[in-house]
């Protein structure tokens, strides 16, 4: 299995899930500007969408999009309990959170990273995501993780989105439950390994201690 990733992007969530599940994989870095992989391939020949993450299976098939990819990876090792059993309400709760994080947090934050985003749009998006983070901060007060006691693929995704607070100069201390969640997840060995492998551990630790 090959994971195509870019440092600092949402592909870190897939890497965390693979590490948490103990699933063997090869990580291949992608330069998103020129769409070339670290081993010299044209990335658009692997994933025509041109962005990460994407996972290429041993039979050559490629899976992308966090809403599909994270649950898929979470099922690779059922013993890791990263995704509740298929067909259960708990399974759909994790998928519900994964969709919320992708659609309401991740995509609404994306314009804030672009240097050519108009100031009016930045203000609109900032207010929108603030309401979304306030909502999830209140929900997080009910348990250590999004759906209770068990760390799941949705938690990996939320952690990555929160890790962008530093780059966006957002204050996580405004959301104490989310800050506690971030610190809690950062302490997990698999998360620290994923961050170390991408050279992001120091930045995450600084954010946690800010």
Image (spheres, helix red, strand yellow):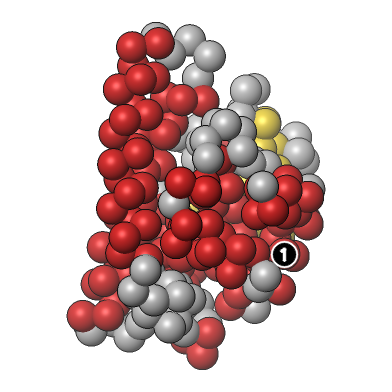
Q: Nearer the viewer, residue 182 or 108?
A: 182
Is 14 placed above or below 49 here?
Answer: below
**Point 77% across, 41% down: residue:** 39
Which percent across, then down, holds residue 175?
44, 51
Would residue 202 be found to the left or right of residue 113 on screen?
right
Secondary structure of residue under mark 1 = helix
Would residue 131 be found to the left or right of residue 170 on screen?
left
Asked whether residue 83 is in view, the answer is no
Asked whether residue 126 is in view, the answer is yes
Which percent across, then down, holds residue 44?
54, 33
Q: Quadrant of the N terminus?
A: bottom right
Is 174 placed above or below 74 here?
Answer: above
**Point 70% across, 60% down: residue:** 194
Q: Which residue is mark 1?
A: 192
In the orientation shown, which residue stands out farthest toward the bottom?
A: 79
**Point 52% across, 48% down: residue:** 173
Would residue 177 be found to the left or right of residue 26 on screen?
left
Q: Nearer the viewer, residue 62 or 96?
A: 96
Q: Nearer the viewer, residue 165 or 53?
A: 165
């Amino acid at each position: 299995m090959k994971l195509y990733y870019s440092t600092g992007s949402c592909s870190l969530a897939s890497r965390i899930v693979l590490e948490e599940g103990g699933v063997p994989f090869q990580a291949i870095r992608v330069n998103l500007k020129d769409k070339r992989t670290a081993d010299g391939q044209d990335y658009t020949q692997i994933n025509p969408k041109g962005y990460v993450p994407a996972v290429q299976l041993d039979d050559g098939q490629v899976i992308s999009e966090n809403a599909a990819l994270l649950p898929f990876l979470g099922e690779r090792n059922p013993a890791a309990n990263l995704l509740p059993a298929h067909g259960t309400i708990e399974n759909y709760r994790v998928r519900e959170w994964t969709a919320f994080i992708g659609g309401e947090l991740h995509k609404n934050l994306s314009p804030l990273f672009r240097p050519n985003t108009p100031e009016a749009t930045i203000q609109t998006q900032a207010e929108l995501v603030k309401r979304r983070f306030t909502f999830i901060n209140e929900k997080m007060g009910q348990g250590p993780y999004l759906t209770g006691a068990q760390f799941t693929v949705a938690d990996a995704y939320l952690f990555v989105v929160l890790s962008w607070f530093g780059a966006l100069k957002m204050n996580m201390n405004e959301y104490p439950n989310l800050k506690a969640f971030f610190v809690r997840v950062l302490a997990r060995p698999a998360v620290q390994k994923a961050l170390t492998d991408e050279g992001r551990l120091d930045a995450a630790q600084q954010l946690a201690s800010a």
